């Protein structure tokens, strides 16, 4: 399975609503979206990414979709 996406969609884990797109910089050690609060418009869940790297997102994203 090839994992060379340029963007990854961030979806809510609870309701599967699409929250935002993130463009990858191809640096697996780079910490991303640190200190950014993301709110789901459908279920009103609020989450904050801490210590997520691009490598972790790329590894856990299935078909270009990462559920948080």
Image (spheres, rainbow, N blue to C red):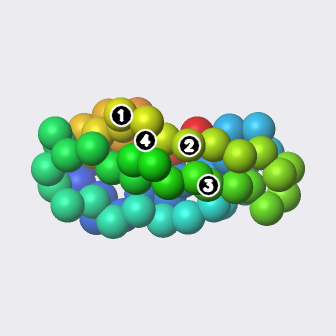
Task: Choose between 57 and 30: the one closer to the eye.
Answer: 30
How packed is label 1: few (under 14 Cα within 10 Å), some, or many (20 or more)? few
| Residue pointed to by mark 3 | 38
| Residue pointed to by mark 2 | 48
Q: Residue furthest front?
A: 35
Q: Secondary structure at mark 1?
A: loop
Task: Choose between 34 and 64: the one closer to the eye.
Answer: 34
Q: Is residue 27 above or below residue 25?
A: above
Point out the tag, 2 or 4, that comes first from the N-terminus. Answer: 2
- Image quarter of the C terminus: top right
Q: Which mark is drawn over residue 51?
A: 1
Distance, label 4 to label 3, CA atoms, is 18 Å
Residue 66 lies, in percent from the top left, at: 50, 45
Q: Are marks 3 and 2 in contact (CB under 8 Å)?
A: yes
Q: Secondary structure at mark 2?
A: strand
Q: Are marks 2 and 1 in contact (CB under 8 Å)?
A: no
């Amino acid at each position: 399975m090839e994992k060379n996406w340029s963007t990854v969609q961030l979806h809510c884990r609870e309701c599967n609503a699409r929250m935002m797109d993130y463009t990858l910089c191809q640096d697996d050690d780079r910490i991303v979206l640190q200190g950014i609060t993301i709110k789901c418009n459908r279920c009103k869940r609020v989450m904050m990414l801490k210590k997520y790297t691009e490598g972790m997102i790329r590894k856990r994203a299935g078909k270009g979709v990462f559920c948080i």
